Amino acid sequence: MNPNPRQLTLLTFVRAQGSVTVEQLAEKLGVTLQTVRRDVQRLADEGLLARFHGGVRVPSSTIENIAHQQRENLNAEGKSRIARAVAAAIPNDCSLILNIGTTTEAIARALLHHTGLRVITNNLNVATILSASPTSEVIVAGGVVRGRDRGIVGEAAVDFIRRFRVDIAVIGISGIEADGTLRDYDYREVKVSQTIIAHSREVWLAADISKFNRPAMVEVATLSQIDRLFTDAPPPEPFPALLAEAQVRYEVAPS
């Protein structure tokens, strides 16, 4: 499914609260109980929410991400807007790293008309997309290919990326917690992402609104290590203050 704006608001609210009743959701969204129950059922069927008697909560797992196809469909319109905003900010003739994630894959599509890019990636989907560009070069990290999303992880990928220092790293993330930490699920992927951050002159984070207040197990970085954030809706509390304190410029992609 591709959740509509109301369902995305519902998801964000549940993630911020942890668990809520159906009545609270109806009041928050200004819709009927029947509409809320229908939305909740659809989101639960996709594994994005877990139901309990009279209410709904976030799925309990902090150790495993949802499937790649589900992530690709989740807020696809918002990710496309983010991708266009990121691409508009990237100049021609520069060096980039794009990491694993459906948002970075959307960004790769938006970069197809750029010229003179040299792109390093540990994401075979990104490499496949950008290999269609006749005027840019794609360099693929070596390592273990993760079958579920074609991401490349492990020590070999870390060692490969250490050889470079690029102009801009554009990274996706699984979750941004309320303490300002960026988190992901696979520690092997996290080590690659940490190396990407350390070997980039600027670090841009691309994260749609569903990533805020979303828990995951392994810490990748903190907001203070990010230079720019691109998202598709105004960040919820307490993130505006956290972003200001960390001196992160953030841009809400226009409709």
Image (cartoon, rainbow, N blue to C red):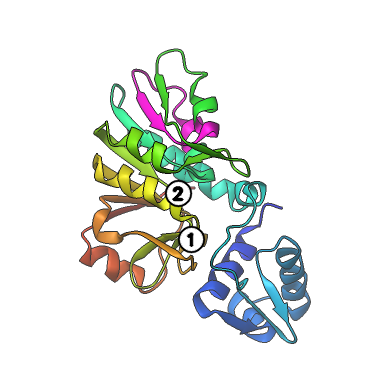
Residue displayed at 33% across by 67% down: 180
Q: Quadrant of residue 225?
A: bottom left
Q: Which amino acid does label 1 sit on?
A: Lys
Asked if one can make out residue 120 in the rendered structure from this viewpoint, the answer is yes
Question: Which residue was labeled with disc 2?
Answer: 189
In the image, which disc is placed on residue 230? none
Judge whether residue 231 can be spotted in this image. no
Residue 201 point in image, percent of width and height: 21, 40
Residue 118 lies in magenta, yes or no? Answer: yes
Residue positioned 35% across, 65% down in the render: 181
Q: What stretch is highlighted in magenta?
A: 106-126
Looking at the image, residue 240 lies above or below residue 113 = below
Within 10 angstroms of label 1, few (less than 14), some, or many (20 or more) residues?
A: many
For mark 1, what is the residue?
211
Q: Is residue 192 positioned above or below 31 on the image?
A: above
Circle 2: residue type? Glu
Classify 210 as above or below 41. Answer: above
Residue 130 pos. (x, y %): 48, 24
Name the foreground residue: 239 vs 50. 50
- Could you tell me which residue is drawn at 28 percent across and 63 percent down? 243
Residue extending farthest front: 155
